[in-house]
Image (cartoon, rainbow, N blue to C red):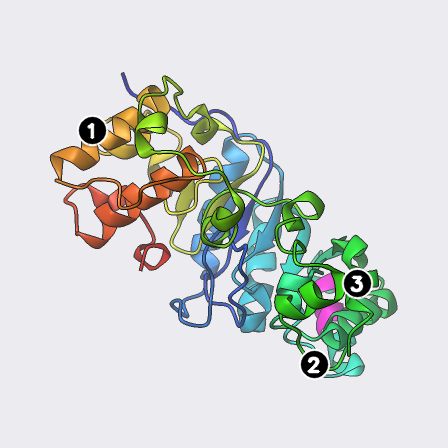
Amino acid sequence: MSIRIPPLMSGGLITNYHCTSKCRHCLYRSSAKREKGYVDYQTARDCFRTARRMGCQNMHIGGGESFLDFEGLKEVLRAAQREGITIEYVETNSIWFSSLDRAVEMLGELKGLGLEQLLVSISPLHNEYIPLRKVRGVMAACNRSGLQIFPWVKGFLPDMETLDENVTHSIEEYQLLFGSDYLEDFPDRYWVHWGGRALETFRQFAILRPAKVFIDMTDPCRCLLDTTHFHFDLNGNYIPGLCSGLAIRREDVEHVLPASNYPVINALVEEGMGGLAAIAGLADIKPSREGYMNKCDLCDDLRGQLSRAGWAGSGELAPAGHYA
């Protein structure tokens, strides 16, 4: 039996995986060491066109950090306009802020291309790389430019305001101020998806269970068919569900996905972790740790090993940089 992606509801376009930050919770494992490619105009148009054909009319733009190629970001907005896609917001960590006047000028250009809202990342994990002064500067520029602000999340501001806004601060500084459980409690205050670097960061706080527990579960990963928050990326790939490190070619996403081309995705949707473990076993790959926090943790481990081993069917395990 082969699977098919349902109509698309709400999603975004990942312009790049390169980022000035290496946030501990990043689902896509973005960092300064990731590839510096940026989505081009035609790929953006193709992704927006496919999304529209599949029922989605509103999308957001994120990264990585989309503002690292400002001219490229403007091209993405032009592509969205051309394909009749409304951009709900562009995400930013604010690293690009240099002065209020320049920020107002830049945001004015984006507003002229149809942008109405900027999602501004606000959290202590971002503050490890981005001074609060830059975040405040971008929000001030939004106010002056007439752009709406989507503060994600505003509730951290009182904590961050206790420290010098002109420099970055480690999470350990926050732990000294607010308690040793500050990082452990972070997911209670900020939505975290269990994938990417978040697994490495929060595994230390979880009750770990043997891989066999998750492999034996008859729990198909139907979340891969969830289209309430999907993404396309700069390579023109569709990321099923929020499962970073899995990829479906854009030209395939409207069609049945045969198991011969997408064995991992089919196995996960139909058989869950047992199906993936069987594929890994054929490649002589086994769980590398004694315990896992959840099935996503185990899935990431097995997929990473398959990718790094150059498994013949690893075309759907992309981008390679996610597993490097």
Element carrying mark 1:
helix
Mark 3 Cα shell of 10 Å, populated few (<14), some (14-19), many (≥20):
few
Using residue 96 as the reference point, say whether residue 134 is left or right of it. right
Q: For mark 1, what is the residue?
A: 278
- Give residue 188's position: percent from left, percent from top: 68, 43
Measured as percent of width and height from the top left, residue 219 is found at 40, 20
Q: In the image, is residue 110 part of the stretch drawn in magenta? A: yes
Residue picked out by circle 2: 167
User: Mark 3, mark 1: which one is toward the viewer?
Assistant: 3
> Relative to 36, is 158 above or below?
above
Marks 2/3: CA–CA distance: 15 Å
* Image quadrant where one finds the C terminus: bottom left
Image quadrant where residue 175 sits: bottom right
Q: Are marks 3 and 1 in contact (CB under 8 Å)?
A: no
Please say whether residue 2 is one of the residues in the magenta stretch.
no
Between 119 and 273, the one lying in front of the other is 273
Residue type at mark 1?
Ala
| Residue 27 numbered mark, or none | none
Q: Is residue 45 left or right of residue 280?
A: right
In 3D space, how far apart are the residues under numbered discs 1 and 2 (Cα atoms)?
A: 49 Å
Q: Going by the image, does 71 lie left or right of 110? A: left
Q: Amino acid at mark 2?
A: Val
Answer yes or no: is residue 19 visible: yes
Q: Earlier in the sequence, mark 3 or mark 1?
A: 3
Q: Identify the mark at residue 159; answer none if there is no mark.
A: 3
- Helix, strand or loop status at disc 3: helix
Amino acid, disc 3: Asp
Q: Which residues are magenta?
A: 106-111
In this view, the mark in front (2 or 3): 3
Tell me if label 2 and label 3 are in contact, CB under 8 Å. no
Q: Quadrant of residue 116?
A: bottom right
Q: Residues within 10 Å of mark 2 (few under 14, many from 20)?
A: some
